[in-house]
Amino acid sequence: MNTPKPADLVIILITGPENPKRLPSAFFLAATAAAAEQEVVIYFTGPATELLAKGKAASVIPMAGGKSIADFMKLATDNGVQIIGCRQSLELNGMTEADLGYSVPLMTPSAALPSLAAAGRLLTW
Amino acid sequence: MATVRGCSFPDELYYDVPNNMWYREDADGTVVTGMTQVAVAMAGQLVAVTPKKAGKEVQAGKSCATIESGKWVGPAKIAFDAEVAAVNDALVADPKMANNDPYNTGWLLRVKPGDWAGAKAHLTPGSQVAGPYEAKMASDGFAGCG
């Protein structure tokens, strides 16, 4: 069985809708790395998981008249960034899988940890 | 020169319309490439251009440079296999040159194609680019270069 190649960059995204101005840079950084052909993963956990709910990311607009977080997430995924959600954090945010607006893999921390720990670089955000 | 929704496309160039890149063959067998006026208009004012280095092999459909503006980041994708022969250092130092003069001083790379004849067959000559670009702009919902 082939072992998947570790990501070059993993961003563990913890910041969620409660602090919108912190979010765009995480996705822009991920998108930039992916545009430079790095393998990039963003692991949504804690409050960040709420951004995966239907319509939520589109409603978070860090700068009046500017792009929504959904737009920044699309910039990242358009460049090939992979998004993974934390399964445990769904309950934390009052969510179930039915509330997800993105088709993303859900992993428990113990399942995600080996690949996160093997990443070339790991940032928490 | 063709003009589509206010965007210019010099006749002597070849275009990769889906990826918004232009190509100019030079007498020495190298090909100069850059972003079309559409690409830079969509990206907005460029703040960083990071091309592959001279000597690097680049593959068809893959990134030959990372392009960054205030609102967008993404790859400039080359249409054919090639070796990078030269980089426009002036553009790297002042990325706005691509916005101001995308087809001349704003060139991105000079490359040695693996098979230019084969590559050219898949590009659109400037004399024929108006129709495909009008269709692409309509499909992308792009209003024009203003």
Image (cartoon, helix red, strand yellow):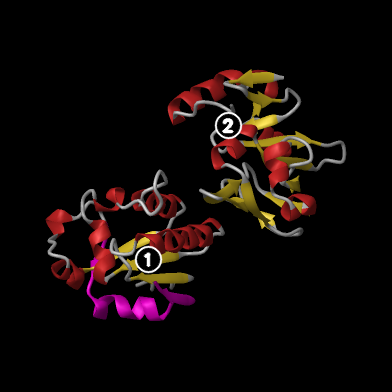
- For the record, the magenta segment spans A104-125
Q: How crowded is the residue under tag 2: few (<14 C-alpha within 10 Å), some, or many (20+)?
A: some
Q: How crowded is the residue under tag 1: few (<14 C-alpha within 10 Å), some, or many (20+)?
A: many
Q: Which residue is mark 1?
A: A42
Q: Position of residue A16 (x, y in %)?
A: 30, 64
> Which residue of the protein is positioned furthest toward the front in this rendering?
A64
Find residue B38 and report its image quarter: top right
Q: Position of residue A108 (x, y in %)?
A: 22, 74
- Dot 2: chain letter: B
Q: Position of residue B47 (x, y in %)?
A: 63, 52
Residue drawn at point x = 69 percent, y = 49 percent: B95
Residue B51 located within the stretch drawn in magenta: no
Q: Position of residue A49 (x, y in %)?
A: 25, 64
Q: Which mark is residue B17?
A: 2
Q: Which mark is residue A4?
A: none
Q: Is residue B22 above or below residue A44?
A: above
Residue drawn at point x = 29 percent, y = 53 percent: A57
Residue type, label 2: Val
Q: Is residue A7 visible?
A: no
Q: Position of B26 compared to B109: left or right?
A: right
Residue type, label 1: Ile
Marks 2/1: CA distance? 31 Å
